[in-house]
Amino acid sequence: MASGQIQDGTSVHGSRQRLRAGFLMGASLLGAGFLALVPESVFFAKNAAAEEGARAPASFADLADKVRPAVVSVNVKSTGAIGDISNRDFPLPDLPPDHPLREFFDQFKRNQPQERRPTRAQGSGFLISPDGLIVTNHHVADKADDIEITFENEEKYKAKLIGSDARTDIALLQIEAKGKKFDRWLEFAETPPRVGDWVLAVGNPFGLGGTVTAGIVSASARDIGSGPYDFLQIDAAVNRGNSGGPSVNLEGKVVGVNTAIYSPSGGSVGIAFAIPASVAKKVVAKLESPAHKVSSGWLGIQIQNVDENIAESQGLKDAKGALVAKILPDGPAAKSELKQRDIIQKVNGTRVSNSRELARTIADLPPGSTATLHIFRNGEERDVSIKLGEFPSNEKFASLGGGSEEGTTGKELEDLGLTLVPAQDFPGSKSKEGVAVQNVDPNSKAADQGIRRGDIIVEVNGKAVSTPEDVVDGIREAREKGRKNVLVQLRSRDQQRFVALPIDQKSAESKDKDSDKRGKR
């Protein structure tokens, strides 16, 4: 996830009012601008540990000496993806779907000669066993053709990728040194750190191996818009190349695997994020299994949070749960009784407060198992059972998403700030269903709810619409029921979501006048 497109077991594509622009994920891939994080302190003097971290240590030297030998630099070579030769020298713009030159540039790109571009990446990692198992980030080791590991003492080894998981950004490597036993490795902490605890980050920023920085845990359970899992926030200085390195506590145990930083400038500004040890440990265990993969439960739906306006529009007292925005074709939910606009409140008897909780809960269930969802629909509560599928690959998942339809003259709903036209009349639209948003007043209620030009209104109050008049009638019906908001289903490019639009007496009056003009009612 996220409202952006959030998948029941994952996240996806993403919107969740996230820290988007500042995030620089990944290894320092040449030309890609990726940034990485470095872990925190792992060990500390016995007397300081006895004080339960009440005071800052006089020195982190003992801790650094213990941790650094287990932290490695990860150097990756890859032939890269097939690319557009000319695009390297003359980058083509990424135009919106309704831009008049979009089709021209898309066709131009397709006609260009193709080649594979060699790439190199640098990141960090750490040993977790004497047999040479190394944890790093998925974005560091993914699609690698050649992996070389370098220790602090300059020893170098070849390594192979055992398995990786894109959703958690964890990868597991195996050093290829038959019979070799290593005397330094790190363990995952059993207890999560508290906000304010000391951490030490060790990694390979800018290729400078064995770099140590210290800081504290600044926050926990951060949502950075990358899947359904929460992250630790630390303030230890981390930079490009620190991806995959450990964040360790004063006992020398890993509390997080560094994966991203927030940076408007590209350098460290003291806001870094790490995958919690509790998540990393579970993923590593699955990657060590014979299957070498992480299997997650999957419902096959798009979901979003329930805000107060949506809750009111559906007659729900509490703004909790996850709203089903779309049921993906051929997914597990498509074969069940679950429907769009259902609000999922519990999974197997456990309450879920929002879409992220639902995503995490489903992801932790094994594919093939049956989940009982307690839902709210049309003022009534009921249970729906669904046999979970396995969360698909990114490529397959993308193919299951909705399309993007992107406007002449239209019916103005001045009180909401919208100008609407039938979708088929919107320039460049390939859709024959729904109503397109031709224009949005930037100071309107609709703009406040994130509605944009080119969005397609699919339903109003659960009823399909094909003309602007249908939208007006849907709003009138909600008003007659005493609703303060009307629930509108939108399709925006590859996302489908619900928006609760506020309605008032003025909107009712404008709709009455409009109906009179049409000679209806």
Image (cartoon, rainbow, N blue to C red):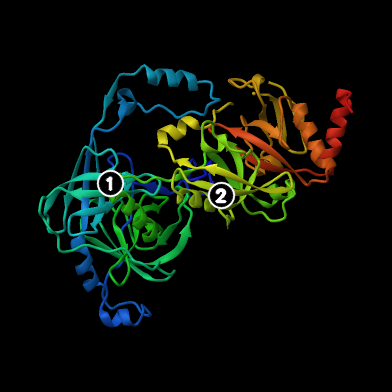
Name the front one of labels 2 and 1.
1
What is the x, y in percent for residue 63?
24, 71
Give the residue type at disc 2: Ser
Measure how far apart labels 2 and 1 are at the Cα level: 32 Å
Which structural element holds mark 1?
A: loop
Residue at image point 58% right, 26% down: 405
Reading the image, the residue beneath label 1 is 290
Residue at image point 59% right, 45% down: 304
Tell me if I can see residue 204 in this picture: no
Residue 45's disc number: none
> Which of the image's four quarters has the C terminus?
top right
What is the x, y in percent for residue 244?
30, 53
Reading the image, the residue beneath label 2 is 355
Give the residue type at disc 1: Pro
Question: For this view, does 174 lie left or right of residue 9?
Answer: left
Pointer 1 local density, CA inside 10 Å: few below 14, some 14–19, many at least 20:
few
Camera-side residue of 13 and 356: 356
Q: Decide: is 274 above or below 336.
A: below
Which structural element holds mark 2?
A: helix
Camera-side residue of 348 and 252: 348
Camera-side residue of 227 and 396: 396
Q: Quadrant of residue 336?
A: top right
Among the two numbered marks 2 and 1 on one chain, the one whose residue lies closer to the N terminus: 1
Tell me if I can see residue 82 in this picture: yes
Residue at image point 84% right, 43% down: 505
Q: How many marks?
A: 2
